[in-house]
Amino acid sequence: MRLEFTRKTKVLAFQRSKGFCEECSARLVPGKFQYDHIKEANDGGDNSLANCKVLCTPCHQPKTTKYVQETRKHERIRDNNIGAFPKTKRPLQSAGFAKAGPQKKATRRLSKWAAWRALGDDNG
Ligand SMILES: [Zn+2]
């Protein structure tokens, strides 16, 4: 489970940052910055001020995305190894194509001779 920083730690970290991203020094906009674990909580990082970094969203997003992807991959591998998802006996089947409705503008079936006459009008 992911732990969160306490309000006190967040306030202290924000004061330390003086309102600027601690990675790229961009001015922090309310709602557009995050408190980042320098060492991720799952990797043994704690929720102390020393492990807290104030980052703007563009600086924080790539790190979070990569971290989430790696965590999901580890979870999938673990789930496969412990057989949490047994293979299904029936293979996946598509829903198939939707039934077409009745044709609105049905043309009359052309007989071979009707087609010949229609083509051959100017041929005499
Ligand atoms: Zn930044």
Image (spheres, helix red, strand yellow):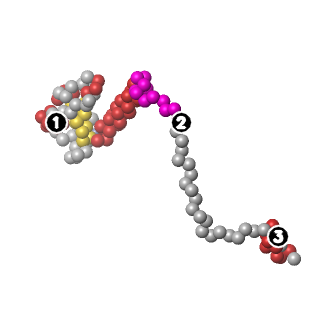
Q: Which dot marks residue 99?
A: none
Q: Residues within 10 Å of mark 2 (few under 14, many from 20)?
A: few
- Disc with the residue nearer the chain's start (1 vs 2): 1
Query: Does residue 122 appear to the left or right of 74 in the view shown?
Result: right
Residue 26 lies within the magenta run? no
- In the foreground, 1 or 31: 1
- Give the alpha-carbon distance from disc 3 to disc 1, as whole Å: 87 Å
Where 72 falls versus 26 (above or below)?
A: above
Q: Please tell me whether residue 62 is drawn above or below residue 82 in the rendered image.
A: below
- Residues in magenta, as a range: 79-90
Q: In the image, residue 99 lies at what x, y percent?
A: 57, 56
Question: Mark 3 highlights which residue?
Answer: 113
Q: Please give the label number shown on residue 10.
A: 1
Q: Relative to residue 29, is residue 71 drawn left or right?
A: right
Marked residue nearer the N-terminal end (3 or 1): 1
Q: Amino acid at mark 1?
A: Lys
Q: What residue is drawn where x is 29% and y is 24%?
A: 43
Residue beneath the point at 54% across and 44% down: 94
Q: Main secondary structure of the magenta part?
A: loop
Q: Secondary structure at mark 3?
A: helix
Task: Report the residue marked by disc 2.
Answer: 91
Q: Residue placed farthest to the front in the image?
A: 89
Per the image, label 2 sits on a secondary structure element best described as loop
Q: Is label 1 in contact with label 2 (beta carbons under 8 Å)?
A: no
